[in-house]
Amino acid sequence: MFQRIIFLSLSIVFALILGGCAHPISMAPNLATVQPTADQPMLDKKVGYHISAASKALEVTTPGGGGDKVRYFPYRDLEPGLYKAIGVVFRDVAKINNPTDAAELDASGIQLLITPEITTNSSSESALTWPPTSFTVTLACQIKDMHGKTLDSLRVEGRGQAEFSEFKSNFSLAAVRASDDALAKLVVALRQSKAFAK
């Protein structure tokens, strides 16, 4: 009986040590899936986008499975996909480091500026494995002219699901699928935006 109590106590301590870990994953999308809208030409505009250094350094932690969590860098992971998504809609894309620097804006030659805000969430139906089985990525983009006037606000939500048989070789799979879905929806939303109406 005494040995059983010791064993249970050690098991609880061990579970507490392991539980609540934040495992690193990546939201980086599969860039090959970011494609132009079929049968639609690029819009003849040069567009800039801005992601601050603070945003790129932001690490986010959300729930995984088994009481554990996952951590990742939404802006850093998603930036290459954002660049490509904007680039399949418009003839030219420029990265803007400081949107308040008039000289940089003039030199860039952009006509409009897109500033994305990324929010995420995750969850898992599994009590035994930590990778998330469900992931969401919300992209909210402000589109402004060169005078700082907001012309449109876009919001798309990407969702990704993954089962154990799929993610056992790719723990980030649900997050990647959510990023892919969000970027595909962003391409459509940009084309439909009133900011780019002729």
Image (cartoon, rainbow, N blue to C red):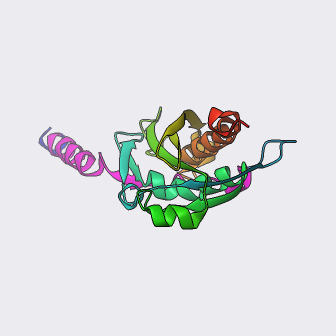
Vertical side of 167 occupied by 53: above or below:
below
Vertical side of 140 occupied by 43: above or below:
below
Extent of the magenta region: 5-34
Vertical side of 186 occupied by 26: above or below:
below
User: Can residue 92 be spotted in the picture?
Assistant: yes
Quarter occupied by residue 165? top right
Q: Pinpoint residue 170: horizontal percent, then vertical percent.
A: 58, 54
The residue positioned farthest toward the left in the image shown: 2
Which sits in the foreground, 117 or 143? 143
Give left or right: position of 63 versus 145.
left
Q: Pinpoint residue 57: horizontal percent, then vertical percent.
A: 37, 60
Give left or right: position of 75 versus 183.
left
Quadrant in which the C terminus appears: top right
User: Can residue 137 be spotted in the picture?
Assistant: no
Quadrant in which the N terminus appears: top left
Q: Residue at 41% of width from left, 41% of height from top?
A: 64
Q: Pinpoint residue 73: horizontal percent, then vertical percent.
A: 43, 55
Q: Residue at 29% of width from left, 46% of height from top?
A: 19
Which sits in the foreground, 44 or 10? 44
Q: Residue at 62% of width from left, 37% of height from top?
A: 195
Magenta segment: does it hold 162? no
Give left or right: position of 103 versus 159.
left
